[in-house]
Amino acid sequence: MKKIATLISMFCLSIGALSAQDSHVVLISIDGLRPEFYMDPRWGMVNVRQGMKTGAYAEGVRGSFPTVTYPSHTTIITGVLPAKHGIYYNTPVEPLGVTGKWYWYYKDIKVPTIWTAAKDAGLKTAGVSWPVTVGAPIDYNLPEYAILPQGKGEKSDEIKAMLQESNPKELFQEVQDYAIGKFGEYGATIDYYTSDQNKSRMAAYILKRYKPAFLAVHIALLDHYEHEQGRDGVKVRSAITGADVAIKTIIDAATAAGISENTTFIITGDHGFVNIHTQFKPNVMLAKLGLYDNDNKTAWKAYFQQSGGSSFLHLKDPNEKATLEKVKQALNQLPEGIQRMYHVLDKEALTKAQGDPNAVMALAAYQGFSFGAAATGDMLAPASGGTHGYLPTDFKEIQTGFVAFGKGIKPGAVLSVMGQEDIAPLIAKLLNLDLKTDGVLYPGLLAPVKK
């Protein structure tokens, strides 16, 4: 009898695993995605708009603070904001000198993610260029990572980095053999249009070959050109059209794999964009106060970590109230014109925004202005193009987007605004995962369950 019971139990478990594997979620992040790109047909997102017509979308997505790539992508796959998940910026705070390092490593995330929940459920996962996934528990992973220059005249090496950190190791060669061909010198950079297309083809191959329950892809060329040209420009328009083509490549892969009817597609982004004309460098102010010496960085007492449209004050001794008061007084004594470029978040406001808990205050810029990290030169400098990093509740232009269609999504559902932390609960529901989040699962997004 025991043997029969064991066999029945094993059979039930296998059926459960097959049932869970029958559902697939493909999460595609377009860096710098703005809602008008899919809501206004003049931007040319033909394929995403087609999905939007058969599914659901949001008119805006409230982001994380700061609204930059790595904290935002981590919020998307954890369902909590930076104060909890631990990825506070794109790059670590480095008052002793900027090294070029980013938050590449999964070990820095402080909470469970979709990846861990899927692994616990016995589901296969995949990732292509998703931030903060070096060393992540992902079955098929080509993480976003770069080996920094080791000597003068050298460049960052994304290709060697992908080879070094791909999981399994043979996956790097596999996607070259069957998806994109051999990487050229610039094949992995975001300076060329091949970047998004290469990523989409690699993702498409993985989807067809391995049929993961969860696949997350990050494409970034749009962000690159919005930084260069601002909210509009020939390169921006070309990049958003290219991103739409890349998405269609992945959609077609699901069809070719025979899993399209069981697949949900979620298209989202990390932040919007704002045109800028002037940069304020608060570390120049700290240098004048004697709190930061560019020639003797080890003696620093205060340092502003810039993050585009925001800047966070760090103290060497967080309990040194005299230094904090000195900075506050200096900010209050700046010319009124400079003070009108931003507003100040004290510790209480910073905590409410769920930004870096190690910072003692933050500056949030208004539209047109950004922050610089330099501690030398003039306090103000000209700026051009666009940026992000602003407080997500300050203005609509910094919101990103959300479109979902396919299995489990209710056609015609529209949300006026949702939170970035609300995406993870939806994915967890679609894949039947156990993941505690701070997000909201909006029942109006879900298609009625067929009886």
Image (cartoon, rainbow, N blue to C red):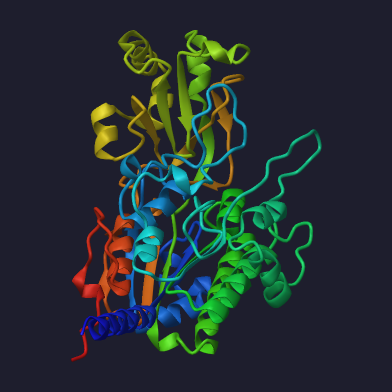
Residue 276 or 427: which is nearer the viewer? 427
Residue 414 or 4: which is nearer the viewer? 4
The residue lying at 40 percent from left, 53 percent from top is 397
Residue 28, compared with residue 322, is above or below; it is: below
Percent x, y of residue 119:
39, 64
- On screen, residue 268 versus residue 218, left or right, reads left
Residue 341 or 331: which is nearer the viewer? 331
The residue lying at 75 percent from left, 72 percent from top is 181
The residue lying at 38 percent from left, 71 percent from top is 403
Q: Is residue 7 visible?
A: yes
Percent x, y of residue 70:
47, 48
Taking the view exactly as shown, the residue that stands out farthest to the right is 153
When asked about the image quadrant of residue 363, the answer is top left
Percent x, y of residue 400:
40, 58
Q: Is residue 68 visible?
A: no
Residue 380, compared with residue 49, is above or below; it is: above
The residue lying at 32 percent from left, 32 percent from top is 357
Tally of numbered discs: 0
Q: Which quadrant is home to the C terminus?
A: bottom left
Percent x, y of residue 163:
68, 57
When asked about the image quadrant of residue 149, the answer is top right
Residue 165, compared with residue 199, is above or below; it is: above
Q: Which quadrant is home to the N terminus?
A: bottom left
